[in-house]
Image (cartoon, rainbow, N blue to C red):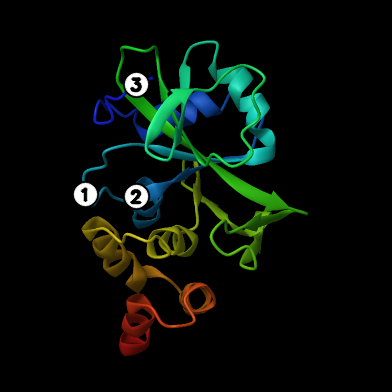
């Protein structure tokens, strides 16, 4: 079991795209990089590179990546090898490196889907058609729509400083429909209120 959690040398977005272009599954750049792809520029440093995949397609991803990479389940603060034939029912994150000594290069994020819809794992009543969760760069690289990525950040139990900066940087670039979807989704997850809802209402 690895414990070198800070041993990261993340691949670039273009390198990640090159890896996944050869795998016949749905995949999307996620995390902070997805927001920067939306903005068209890098606005801050990124400690990792996140790739979102559909949970039901994990076997194809595993089979393709294990030819050249070592995959670790990241669960409850621990890293353990993802074994051949093991189906990940609830693990949401997988860290990937060349071998057990090399730095981690990218993170897989397994997302739930149901009947051609993306399902938000923290509040399953929040859904979007799969055709409506991604955008593409001019180079054809798919990335998670910014309002969905912001929900994933704002819906966390621990909103980090970088999440707050991302929210305030990206929000003004969203159209009315995207902002309303984000606000309503936050209301659904947090009926007691959320500071980002207050911010949206104060700037709307």
Disc 2 and disc 1 in contact, CB within 8 angstroms: yes
Q: Which residue is mark 1?
A: 44
Where is residue 118 shown, x and y percent of the image?
A: 64, 55
**SS at badge 3:** loop
Q: Residue 123 or 142: which is nearer the viewer?
A: 123
Q: Residue 33 or 101: which is nearer the viewer?
A: 101
Looking at the image, which residue is at 41% across and 62% down?
150
State which tag comes first along the sequence, 2 or 1: 2
Disc 3 and disc 2 in contact, CB within 8 angstroms: no
Judge whether 14 appears above or below 82 on screen. below
Report the quarter where the C terminus lies.
Answer: bottom left
**SS at badge 2:** helix
Where is residue 97 shown, x and y percent of the image?
A: 39, 20
Q: Which residue is mark 3?
A: 2
Q: Which residue is mark 2?
A: 32
Q: CA distance from mark 3 to mark 2?
A: 25 Å
Q: Is 122 displayed left or right of 63 in the figure?
A: left
Q: Residue 116 or 76: which is nearer the viewer?
A: 76
Q: Quadrant of residue 133?
A: bottom right
Q: Residue 23 or 162: which is nearer the viewer?
A: 162
Q: CA distance from mark 3 to mark 1?
A: 28 Å
């Amino acid at each position: 079991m690895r414990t070198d959690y800070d041993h990261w040398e993340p691949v670039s977005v273009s390198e990640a795209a090159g890896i996944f272009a050869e795998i016949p599954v749905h995949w999307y750049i996620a995390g902070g990089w997805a927001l920067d792809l939306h903005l068209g520029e890098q606005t801050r440093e990124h400690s990792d590179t996140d790739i979102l995949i559909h949970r039901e397609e994990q076997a194809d991803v595993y089979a393709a990546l294990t030819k050249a990479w070592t995959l670790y389940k990241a669960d409850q603060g621990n890293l353990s090898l993802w074994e051949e034939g093991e189906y990940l029912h609830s693990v949401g994150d997988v860290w990937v490196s060349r071998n057990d000594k090399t730095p981690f290069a990218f993170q897989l994020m397994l997302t739930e889907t149901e009947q051609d819809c993306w399902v938000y794992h923290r509040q399953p009543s929040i859904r979007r058609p799969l055709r409506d969760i991604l955008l593409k760069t001019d180079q054809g690289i798919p990335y998670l729509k910014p309002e969905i990525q912001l929900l994933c950040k704002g819906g966390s139990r621990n909103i980090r400083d970088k999440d707050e900066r991302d929210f305030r940087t990206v929000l003004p670039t969203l159209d009315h429909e995207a902002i309303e979807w984000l606000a309503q989704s936050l209301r659904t997850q947090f009926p007691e209120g959320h500071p980002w809802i207050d911010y949206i209402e104060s700037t709307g």
